[in-house]
Image: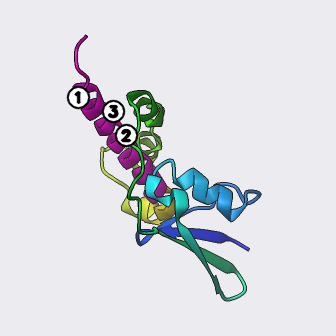
Amino acid sequence: MPRIFVYDCREFPDPDPTLSVEDIRKQLSDFFPELANAETREERRGEDETRYTFTRRIGTKGRPRPTVVEILRRVPEKRLAVLALAAELVGPDGELDVDAAAARQPEVNLALAEAQAYARATHQAVRALRQLRPR
């Protein structure tokens, strides 16, 4: 039975059917840190689909500020799936194949989430480095 994962009104494909829902949530928390302690709701749609919706929990008060090293470690590798996917979905004429992109919407969502996480982590790292005082 296919599984669909939903967060922030976006659907994500099942990266590995052998992984538990908890493992998938942990993987997505690499892209969306707020999912680290998210709640999960399961919804069966007919006989052939199960949707898991992740919802942020409120209340991160009192969390210690991360160190620069911790922030730098959160920046993902620079091989972004969105670039490879764009290469596959753009034809030789330089135009986006809209039908192919629509058919691969969950992959597009995951690639965009990865790119956004990369940008967020990079901005955090830059801000943290700018706040360092010279010795």
Tell me if 112 is positioned left or right of 24 in this view: left
Q: Is residue 32 visible?
A: no
Q: Which mark is residue 121?
A: 2
Foreground: 102 or 41? 41
Q: Quick check: 16 above or below 52? A: above
Q: Quadrant of residue 99?
A: bottom left
Q: Disc 2 residue type?
A: Ala
Residue placed under numbered mark 3 in the picture: 125
Range of the magenta residues? 109-135
Q: Are marks 2 and 3 in contact (CB under 8 Å)?
A: yes
The 10 Å Cα crowd at callout 2, few under 14, some 14 to 19, many 20 or more, is: many
Q: Residue at x 46, y 37 (%)?
A: 74
x then y, percent, for residue 6: 51, 70
x then y, percent, for residue 70: 45, 33
Q: Residue at x 67, y 56 (%)?
A: 23
Q: Residue at x 66, y 61 (%)?
A: 22
Residue placed under numbered mark 1 in the picture: 131
Magenta stretch: includes residue 120:
yes
Q: Disc 1 residue type?
A: Gln
Label 1 SS: loop
What secondary structure is the magenta-colored segment mainly?
helix
Q: Disc 3 residue type?
A: Ala
Q: Earlier in the sequence, mark 1 or mark 2?
A: 2
Query: Distance of mark 1 from mark 3, alpha carbons?
Result: 10 Å
Q: Is residue 23 visible?
A: yes
Q: Earlier in the sequence, mark 1 or mark 3?
A: 3
